[in-house]
Amino acid sequence: MAAWTWRFENSDGTEVQPAVQPEDWTTQGDAESWIGEQWKELLEGGAEQVRLFEDDNEIYKMSLRAAADV
């Protein structure tokens, strides 16, 4: 079974510790739901962007700052 995880980064791509402790999810939808609920607190804690991984494969990168500008 695949593990879905987020990597948290500052604006230059350096990994940072998230303000909210993540977990490993078994579905992409669960991982995306979690980020949808936590992105504001993560952004306030210093994470500017996130990358979603399925096991070791990067699925996509997303800016948390862009979500704040909407």
Image (cartoon, rainbow, N blue to C red):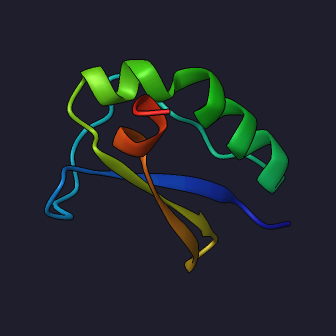
Q: Position of residue 21 (x, y in %)?
A: 44, 27
Q: Residue at x 51, y 52 (%)?
A: 6
Q: Residue 37's image quarter?
A: top right
Instruction: Mark yes or no: residue 65 visible.
Output: yes
Tell which residue pokes out farthest to the bottom in this image: 57
Instruction: Mark yes or no: residue 20 visible.
Output: no
Q: Position of residue 13 (x, y in %)?
A: 21, 64
Q: Residue at x 48, y 37 (%)?
A: 67
Q: Is residue 12 above or below residue 45?
A: below
- Give the left or right position of residue 22, taking residue 24 as reference: left
Q: Residue at x 78, y 55 (%)?
A: 28
Q: Position of residue 32 (x, y in %)?
A: 70, 44
Q: Position of residue 16 (x, y in %)?
A: 21, 46
Q: Residue at x 67, y 57 (%)?
A: 4
- Give the left or right position of residue 69, taking residue 19 as reference: right
Q: Nearer the viewer, residue 2 or 61?
A: 61
Q: Nearer the viewer, residue 11 or 45?
A: 11
Q: Is residue 70 above or below residue 63?
A: above
